[in-house]
Image: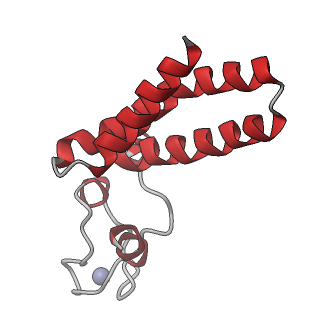
């Protein structure tokens, strides 16, 4: 039974991640994460400690995917304000919260670049 869920969630995650429909992409890491408890149970049952290490690695990769896909950083910016690095490279003006939220890369005062915004956009 455990292995059925492992197959379902694992294959589902890959299916969604590789699907041409981009709307499915952000669900892939969540489906992958949903399968991790079953992987962990399987590793525990079989005493497969190498497998257990892989479960940790896969969980980290899926968690990163979920973070990226759901734009957690943008959410954090909106909630807590912008980080201090988001200054204009030209005039040093601090990026406004609204600019950060909209991924503005150019300073409208001097046409300089926000370095942090550039890195995030890349
Ligand atoms: Zn500027």
Q: Position of residue 84 (x, y in %)?
A: 50, 64
119 relative to 33 in the view: left or right: left
Q: Which residue lies furthest to the top in this view?
A: 1
Q: Where is residue 41 in the image (x, y as percent from the top left)?
A: 69, 18
Q: Where is residue 58 in the image (x, y as percent from the top left)?
A: 60, 43
User: Which corner quadrant holds the C terminus?
Assistant: bottom left
Q: Which of 76 and 97 is in front in this view?
A: 76
Above or below: residue 20 compared with residue 79:
below
Count of numbered circles on the image = 0
Q: Where is residue 35 in the image (x, y as percent from the top left)?
A: 51, 26
Q: Give the quarter of the image for residue 78.
A: top left
Q: Which residue is drawn at 31% across and 54% down?
A: 97
Residue 70 seen in this snapshot: no
Q: Which of 31 and 1 is in front in this view?
A: 1
User: Which corner quadrant holds the N terminus?
Assistant: top right
32 relative to 75 in the view: left or right: right
């Amino acid at each position: 039974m455990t292995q059925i869920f492992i197959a379902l969630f694992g294959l589902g995650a890959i299916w969604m991640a590789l699907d041409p429909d981009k709307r499915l992409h952000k669900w892939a890491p969540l489906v992958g994460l949903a399968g991790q408890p079953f992987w962990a149970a399987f590793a525990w049952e079989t005493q497969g400690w190498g497998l257990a290490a892989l479960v940790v690695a896969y969980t980290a990769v899926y968690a990163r995917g979920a973070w990226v896909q759901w734009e957690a950083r943008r959410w954090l910016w909106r909630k807590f304000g912008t980080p201090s690095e988001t200054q204009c490279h030209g005039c040093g003006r601090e990026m406004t919260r609204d600019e950060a939220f909209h991924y503005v890369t150019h300073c409208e005062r001097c046409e300089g670049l926000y370095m942090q915004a550039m890195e995030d956009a890349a």
